[in-house]
Image (cartoon, rainbow, N blue to C red):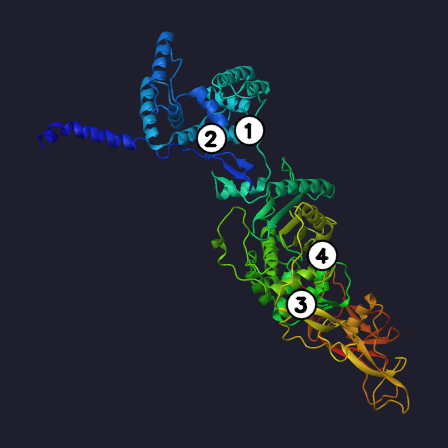
Amino acid sequence: MSWLNKYRFRIAILIGVSVAFAWILPNPLFDVPYSTVVLDSQGGLLGAHTARDGQWRFPLSDSVPDRFASSLLHFEDEYFYWHPGVNPVSLSRALWSNIKSGRVKSGGSTLTMQVIRLSRENPPRTYPEKIWEMVLAMRLEWSYSKDEILQLYAAHAPFGGNVVGLEAASWRYYGKPAEKLTWAESATLAVLPNAPSMIYPGKNREPLARKRNRLLEKLLHNEVIDSNEFSLALLEPIPERPQPLPRRAAHLVDRLQAIHEGQTLRSTLDPYLQDQTNEVLNQVAEENAYNHIYNLSALVIEVSTGEVKAYVGNSKDLQYRHDNWVDMVGARRSTGSLLKPFLFAAMLEDGKMTPYSLVDDIPVNFRGYSPKNFNRQFEGVVPADHALNRSLNVPAVNELQRYGVERFYQYLSSWGMRTLDFPSDHYGLSLILGGSEGTLENLSEMYLNLARAVQEQSPEKLKILPSSAAENTNLKPTLEPSLAWFTTQALVGVRDQNASRKPTLAWKTGTSFGNRDAWAIGYNPQYVIGVWLGNADGEGRPGLTGASKAVPLMMKIANFIPEASWFEMPYSGWEERELCLHSGLPKSENCRSAESLPVPRNMKEVLPCHYCHRYLTDTLGERRYNRQCLPSGMPYAWHSYFQLSPVREWYYSQFHGDYERVPALARVCTTERPSNPMGLIFPDKHNLKIYIPVEVDGKLGKVVFQAVHRNPESTIFWHLGDRYLGETQGIHQLSLQPEPGKYDLVLLDAEGHEIRRTVEILGKESN
């Protein structure tokens, strides 16, 4: 071991140098910020953000295009793949040239040395600095492959102005990805980093063209390109000036920038659907601008994967004059009627109605809350599926009252509604009419899962970036397929699964109070399309409704999605039943007509029809009898009647001219008390607390009491407490301004029928 002692100092130095050499390379080599780059599903550029230092510097690509690599190596470093980071021949030639000229004229740097210089932000050109670059270059070659070093150079070379890196330069100067550059374009970009501050497109174009052409001649001489390619390349112009980058999904790029800054992200967006949706929204925005409706947004989602295929956060306005910078896909807005299908589904799941059961459509008052239909009309009763298809408000509120606000609140939460920030009693019955807020993204996700439920697929979250299914493990299973199918059929107005008309979309509209928001969300087995129109600042506009504005926009987008076969009816969970034609309930013995329709199998609490009754009448059906009062020998007949209460009948008969009223009881039938032909519309229940309304001028208004009578010729006499109010005929309404207190309201007709209600007048409603 004497030799070890003899050379221990040299060995220590060697080990020290080796350790130093191993650790001298910075990690990371380039400590710089990068642009956020968002691509479509095919790799096309949707948009990008500058890096935090204001540079267009795209993250490293997986490879360098062959044309650019060949052009660059023939211009900068022909022996790149042969030297260890330093080329002694080039260095000697450069040193001799500098000595002869008396100044630094050539650096003799290899591409590897240039990568080191770029990573050190171009320090002053001195001989000590050059030596240090050579050491670091050899160290770089020790850890990186030649292709990786080439990628580092391509990503960090300066290309003039604030353009750094090949990919950014390709888009800024030629409006295309680097892999599609021609030989002329590749040669132009290969020579740019040599003097980026003096020569770049838009400045000194002639010197730049000469440098490019010399490089092309070299490529021809070295047989990299042929004479035809050379001749065509010479004809290509030098770009005039940098171009703006694509803005095909500006709001999505902004959104992803906040989460994934400095990354290249391949989204799920389909390039064709994205571009067509952009075009449609910009066209519709121009059409609506005359009515001062400036903001629009849209989503197109693939049902099978949950992937977003088109994402337009707002209409195009480069000046951002009308809040067009706001991403309305994620903005919270009043939901309007968009939650009604989920209440319909909840009621079916509850097993208390068929899809065709009658629901009330009469004036109601819930502690001062009096919902109205959009058309300001009432129809007495309507089938549940028709009420949903026509988006009637009063039936929806009645259904919610029956189902329970708290239960429905929890039901919406189970569907993944993420904008219910307050307890259920904060929303009350208005929850079903836009009393809550939602986002286009979240509501579209709920409709996505409604579509998936029909097809017996698990619920899915929206995907903007490809991700694993593990994200969805916390989603609760959704609706039973047959119930989702019935809900879907109600939305398109089709009851029979064998109906010849096969719709393009099942869809629902929404219009918020004050015409501030217009919604439409539609779906078929392949896609969900959701759109919103309005003003980001909340200004309402006349005519801004879901039906008039949002549906046409949705249908224009639907023209670009592939045609799809309609939903197949699920194999289980339903059955054919004979239903009363008038009530939509299981047929009873008194039903005059029935039809066979599919219904959910879980109708555990749906009783046979109770609207239809059989009566003994004369043969003409003009008078009603019973067996005790039927005159001896008189011909008679049994007739079935669809019978509603007086209030429901009064409204229903206005829309159904074929409604057949039950005949009046014959006078000889004194033992049977005739049914009460009167009904109170308001107040509609006992012990109702009534506030006196306040007019616009601040003065107290009047309360309007309203009743109906089956006999349009009858007179109703009104009493409030011990005060006689008057009589009415035809239209039975009275307006009054009683003093606060508790009263008995009594109505009498000429035949002695009576209605009695206890009401409490509370004075004006406090703010």
Q: Amino acid at mark 3?
A: Glu
Residue 281 location, quadrant: top right
As measured in the structure, the alpha-carbon distance from the residue carrying label 3 to the one carrying label 4 is 29 Å
Q: Which of the marked residues, 2 or 1, is nearer the chain's N terminus?
A: 2
Q: Which mark is residue 399?
A: 3
Q: Could you classify mark 3 by the number of other residues whose Cα lies within 10 Å: few (under 14), some (14-19), or many (20 or more)?
A: many
Q: Secondary structure at mark 1?
A: helix
For residue 131, side relative to residue 273 (left or right)? left
Residue 651: x percent and y percent?
Answer: 80, 68
Residue 277 location, quadrant: top right
Q: Which mark is residue 64?
A: 2
Residue 596: x percent and y percent?
Answer: 73, 71
Residue bearing the label numbered 4: 502
Task: Tell which tag, 2 or 1, sits nearer the viewer.
Answer: 2
The answer to whether mark 1 and mark 4 are in CB contact below 8 A is no
Residue 584 appears anywhere in the view? yes
Residue 164 appears anywhere in the view? no
Q: Amino acid at mark 4?
A: Lys
Residue 477: x percent and y percent?
Answer: 54, 62
Task: Tell which tag, 1 or 3, sits nearer the viewer.
Answer: 1
As measured in the structure, the alpha-carbon distance from the residue carrying label 3 to the one carrying label 2 is 63 Å
Q: Secondary structure at mark 4?
A: loop
